[in-house]
Image: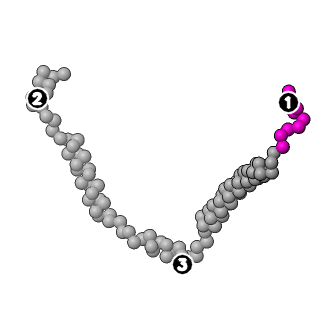
Amino acid sequence: MENKEYSEKKDFGTVAKETFKKISAFFARWFFMMSLLAAAIFCVFVWYSFIWKADWDDAQKQTYINEQAKFSFDKAGYKKMVDMMENRKNKLKNFPRFTGRDLFFPEGF
């Protein structure tokens, strides 16, 4: 019969390792959570400062518009391409149907 009042004494090394594991797990959890919280706060700050509260003066706005206006839209070329596509669509739609003999089904369906 065992005496449960007196448990085995653990040596100092085992107790220190278990305590270190518990403390490090506690701090690792809190460090991870605080890192996520800091990243979320940083993302909100960037969103707020660059998107929500973007203060551009008229010169910066005009510079941006001029940079974006380098692409010129060729309206005549676009109209020509749309007309060509319409002509192809009409040719396919009004294409004469084949009324000759069917090679694969000579008797019909």
Q: What residue appears at the point 80 percent right and 51 percent down from the top-left corner?
A: 12
Tell me which label, 1 or 2, sits earlier in the chain: 1
Name the amino acid, label 3.
Ala
Q: What residue appears at the point 61 percent right and 71 percent down from the top-left corner?
A: 55
Name the amino acid, label 2.
Leu
Q: Image quarter for residue 105?
A: top left
Furthest residue in direction right, as rendered: 5
Q: What residue appears at the point 85 percent right and 30 percent down from the top-left corner?
A: 2
Q: Which residue is mark 3?
A: 59
Highlighted range, magenta = 1-9
Disc 3: CA contacts within 10 A as few (<14), some (14-19) or many (>=20): few
Depth check, mark 1 against mark 3: the one in front is 1
Furthest residue in direction bottom, as rendered: 59
Depth check, mark 1 against mark 2: the one in front is 1
Name the amino acid, label 1.
Glu
**10 vs 83: above or below:** above
Tell me which label, 2 or 3, sits earlier in the chain: 3
Please tell me the numbered disc located at residue 2. 1
Magenta: main secondary structure equals loop
Depth check, mark 2 against mark 3: the one in front is 2
Q: Is residue 7 left or right of residue 91?
A: right
Coordinates of residue 34 in the picture (x, y in percent):
71, 57
Please tell me the numbered disc located at residue 64. none
Q: Which residue is mark 2?
A: 103
Q: CA distance from mark 1 to mark 3?
A: 88 Å
